[in-house]
Amino acid sequence: MARIKTTIVGSLPKPSWLAKPEVLWAPWQLEGERLAEGKRDAVRTVLKMQEQAGIDIVGDGEQTRVHFVHGFLQGVAGVDFNKLKRIGIRADRYEADCPTVVAPVSWRAPVHADDVKFARANTLHKFKFTLPGPMTMVDTLADDYYKDRSKLAFALADILNAEAKALEAAGADTIQFDEPAFNVYLEEVRDWGVAALERAAAGLKCTTAVHICYGYGIKANDDWKKTLGGQWRQYESTFPLLAKSSVKQVSLECANSRVPIDLISLLKGKDVLVGAIDVASNVVETPQQVAATLREAMKYIPVENIHGCTNCGMAPMARPIAEAKLQALAAGARLLSAESGLS
């Protein structure tokens, strides 16, 4: 049986010459061709960082995007970035200046295909690319046209599907849709969220994944978590729905969280990307701590369905800390693989 593989959720810290360090969604510090060159250099850097750390399925660290949702939406027709509105995000957990939907949304051309081609040419590892999920996109937009969250979500799902197929053709081995909103709007997840996600992933032959977590390590998210009580049970209503879906992998938060680990038993038949690295703490996990988190997951799902992963993206983190955490993730997975007699 193969050893436990490792991967990342998506974002990694950007080099200081590309964007201000330890700031989430920091604007670019370069322009024009220097910016294009800087993005390429940053992608090479984070690919090498992951490879040297021992990560098996690597990503581009979202080095070519300032924002994981808006970076894609900039290539979508019907979305006006000159008409920004300050709106509440994730049930008003925090506010953000968001572009406005002013007309029917449509896909003009691949947004990230060149990014995938470049990364694919610069690594021999399996490569994963992340896209925002439909519900999370809806929740990060001001809508002056559809005025119906589900209608907008399905329109965006069709666009995401076209994009995902283009990224698959460009060389992505895994396409992951990020849906942090799935932990907030539980009734909408049931009513239309999973259906919109399935439409976004329809027809893909590559590995498909969805990431659901409790957010980046920023104050708004930390404050929200304090209101969730002694056990975080949002996954309890969502996982059975995802277990019935066609999406192959589910990425979730486990390390230093109050998620009851037994909830992952609800994901029977799926590959589970077990978050074993806390992105809300600068304390670097030991390989033994990573192995312990993954070992707990083994009580509820077969080891062949387990991947080691980070809880969420690492964009706001200092690069040396992020690198050390990746090394611990890979070392912990190797440790448990050896303990379990996996080759």
Image (cartoon, rainbow, N blue to C red):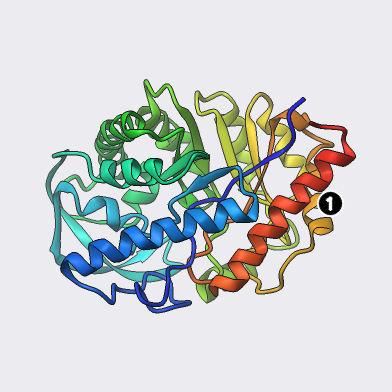
Q: What is the quadrant of residue 87 in the picture?
A: bottom left
Residue under the point 28% across and 57% down: 70
Q: Amino acid at mark 1?
A: Ala
The reply to whether residue 342 is in sight is: yes
Between 251 and 143, the one lying in front of the other is 251
Residue 220 screen position, x and y as percent = 51, 73
Residue 23 screen position, x and y as percent = 43, 76
Which structural element holds mark 1?
A: helix
Between 136 and 150, the one lying in front of the other is 136
Tell me: 321 left or right of 165. right
Q: Is residue 93 above or below residue 310?
A: below
Instruction: Tell me if mark 1 has few (under 14), some (14-19) or many (20+) residues whose alpha carbon lies within 10 angstroms of its own.
Output: some
Quarter in which the N terminus is drawn? top right
- Residue bearing mark 1: 292
Residue under the point 30% across and 73% down: 27
The reply to whether residue 11 is in sight is: no
Quarter in which the C terminus is drawn? top right
Tell me: 87 left or right of 79. right
Q: What is the quadrant of residue 271 in the picture?
A: top right
Residue 207 screen position, x and y as percent = 49, 29
Q: What is the quadrant of residue 155 in the picture?
A: top left
Residue under the point 57% across and 58% down: 214
Tell me: 322 left or right of 149. right
Q: Is residue 64 above or below residue 336?
A: below
Tell me: 297 left or right of 75. right
Residue 12 screen position, x and y as percent = 49, 61
